[in-house]
Amino acid sequence: MLASFFAPDMSFEPSQKLTFPVPIYVRQLSEAFACEQPSTAKANQARKNTLAVWAVYNYLKLMGIRADLTTSDSWNPIMRWATNSADLNIQNVGRLECRPMDPEASSCLVPPEVWCDRIGYVAVALSPTWDWATLVGFTPTVNGSEVTVASLQPLSQLLDQLYALQVPLNWIVQPHIQLSQWLTGIFEAGWESVETLLSTLNPPPAYPMRSVMLAAAAAPPIREHLPKGLRRAKLMTLRSGLESCPVVLVIYIEATSSRIRLMVQVYPGSQQFTLPPELALQVIDEKGTPFLTARSQRADSYMQLQFWGSLGEPFATALRWKGAETIEHFVI
């Protein structure tokens, strides 16, 4: 029974901290990963990351949420050596970062290399003997290298986040926008040049932009900020109850000798200079699995995701805000 698996003083409530034992085979696996590393510091890092990822994986498994260790960077020997990633790939959702911490610590450290392309962060406290793990809390975003325990949300918020981001299974049967036709000058209805679309907004915005990957200052307006190349924009509105969130979705496409470079950007679609907090942008592959994720924070004036693809390859973009969502389907 589940009750016998958890620490005897803990009740199984998703809104509370959860402590449970780490099986011997998991500790042995973490030692094996540690032995691969070139230094004591890297070995300790790999050990802690492995235990933290397994703890979150085990919790999600008990909650009926499917995750894949084998496609996570934390389970890849090359990535373990090259990075400090403790990610867990959640099927049809994205990558969740599982950060280890000491039980008595008041904060959890988050390395800069995992500040983007994550759907959230879970703090996991590990006992000094590695035989117990406690899921301390969750945060959807980070603003620096340290997250205080006091600022963490309960685990119930993690579950809400994962369910909200889950991609509908029927997404792939929707009509696809043919991006290859854009290269020949053929565009679907609703997709306009950036200049044309901005001229219809009253007043036309000149955004002081800030990258979701860099804490930074003002940049040129949208017309100047985008690289030279083929791009189209679409105005869309997400509605949640009586609230609405107008945004501009911009797709940039550039053909090279071998592959296609793509850029997805989101800007405020009203007189606001910033995006609303907790607006989520995802790029989804042909299997319905998100492989890039960005989430707006306070004072973010735009979001941007970049990737490469091949002719004929399908993908989708998803925008989510307060339970509302809109998905656009493309084929390169």
Image: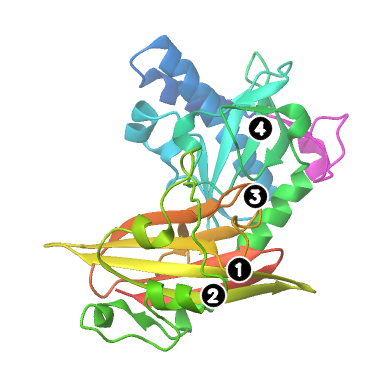
Q: Amino acid at mark 3?
A: Lys
Q: Please report whichever mark, 4 or 3, sits nearer to the chain's N-terminal start.
A: 3
- Distance between the alpha carbons at the discs numbered 3 and 1: 41 Å
From this viewpoint, which residue is outermost toward the left? 257
Q: Is residue 178 visible?
A: yes
Name the quadrant of the N terminus: top right
- Distance between the alpha carbons at the discs numbered 4 and 2: 43 Å
The kind of secondary structure element at disc 3 is: helix
Q: Which mark is residue 123?
A: 4
Q: Are marks 2 and 3 in contact (CB under 8 Å)?
A: no
**Residue for point 53% across, 74% down:** 327
Q: Magenta part of the protein: which range?
A: 1-21
- Distance between the alpha carbons at the discs numbered 4 and 1: 36 Å
Q: Which residue is mark 3?
A: 61
Q: Please report whichever mark, 3 or 1, sits nearer to the chain's N-terminal start.
A: 3
Q: Please report whichever mark, 2 or 3, sits nearer to the chain's N-terminal start.
A: 3
Q: Where in the figure is residue 205, as x and y percent of width and height?
A: 52, 64
Q: Which mark is residue 270?
A: 1
Q: Residues within 10 Å of mark 1 (few under 14, many from 20)?
A: some
**Residue for point 60% across, 55% down:** 274
Q: Which mark is residue 260?
A: none
Front-lying residue, 31 or 306:
306
Q: Is residue 261 left or right of residue 273?
A: left
Residue 231 falls in which quadrant of the image? bottom left
Q: Which residue is mark 2?
A: 201
Q: Nearer the viewer, mark 2 or mark 3?
A: 2
Q: Please report whichever mark, 4 or 1, sits nearer to the chain's N-terminal start.
A: 4
Q: Is residue 166 left or right of residue 19?
A: left
From this viewpoint, which residue is outermost toward the front? 203
